[in-house]
Amino acid sequence: MTSKGSCHMPDILRTSDNKERRVGVEVEISGLSYEKLVALTARLLDGEARQTSRYVSSVTTPLGEFLIELDSDPIKEMDLKDQRLPESIRELGGHAMDIIDAAAERIVPLEIVSPPIPFTRLEAIETLCNELREAGALGSREAIVYAFGLQLNPELPDLKPATLVNYFRAFATLYDWLKSRHQLDLSRKFTSYIEPWDSDYIDLLLKDDYEPDQRQLMEDYLRTNPTRNRALDLLPLFSYLDDELLRKHVEDRRIKSRPTLHYRLPDCDIDNPEWHFSTVWNDWVVLEQLVANAADLKELAGLYRDSRKLSFHNLTSSWTNNCHRWLEAKGYV
């Protein structure tokens, strides 16, 4: 492990075909104008910005192409010069858009979407978030209407069913602990897109003899979780593995096929000086390290399975606290 305030690295840094593992990062903020955010991101990442449409810009950097956009399709696509609109509306033109812009930038998040970045280059995202804070970026805690997140899309080391089961088990086991550390904002607690997995699915997943093939793994999950609205969304991964099978269970044009997990749980608390991108990332690395240690994963998963049984001990103790103590004792945190 490296020092506090920097991005830790997991033991498994390369894929099974010996390529460096990468991760996509999505950061939602407010507090800055769209134009200022684009200019700052380009400067901080030594990039060149190009506007592709209203409220959508690409920034070409040494790390790849970043996308900066207003996270609201209707506003991004609005065109008051459209000849189909009544003339009285079209005459308002830029004045109307100025009003819409001012309102949108206060209540709709601006989003920075990174390209896939090598794990070892993530300090650039740490620096970017710190600099945006200094420039006045705001996160979830600023107002009840804000429900801004920081999402990770980590590439998996391989796509074997046994590997996927280990990642899924680790996440199910660590969900409450991760939520206690990174899902703090009231507005996000009342949204549906960071729900845990279905309880029956978790019971199946945690069985010692659960060894599905790829098709069974997908069908077991999709039967009880046919939605993007999960704290760890598996639909992009499943689309990559077998899109035809996925579409038999769920049809959603927003699903993007990729060989990654989609971790949606953490808040973006960017205006809090105690919050850092590295803190969120380093807790994800705890999950990575747990997956890499089969004996520890089996032990913690067993403890979690026991914690779900009805007993006086479980009614009077907290799995989150017990999990944290276990992680401390084992040297994970």
Image: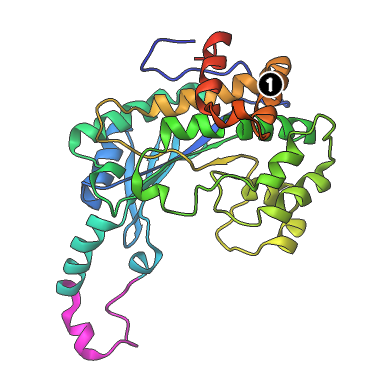
Front residue of 52 and 94: 94
Where residue 252 appears, x then y in whole percent?
Answer: 60, 63
Q: Is residue 33 above or below residue 151?
A: below
- Give the residues drawn in magenta, as a range: 78-94
Mark 1 closeness class: few <14, some 14–19, many ≥20 residues within 10 Å: many
The residue that disc 1 covers is 297
Please tell me which residue lies in front, 330 or 13.
330
| Nearer to me, 169 or 289 | 169
Asked if residue 81 is positioned above or below residue 322 in the image, the reply reads: below
Residue placed at 18% from the left, 39% from the top? 136
| Residue at figure coordinates x 30%, y 57% from the top left | 108
Quarter location, residue 185: top left
Front-most of 61 and 203? 203
Q: Residue at x 38, y 13 (%)?
A: 4
Mark 1: which secondary structure?
Answer: helix
Image coordinates of residue 256 in percent, x first then y, are 59, 53
Task: Name the kind of residue labelled 1 in the image.
Answer: Leu
Q: Is 103 left, or right, of 183 in this rendering?
A: left
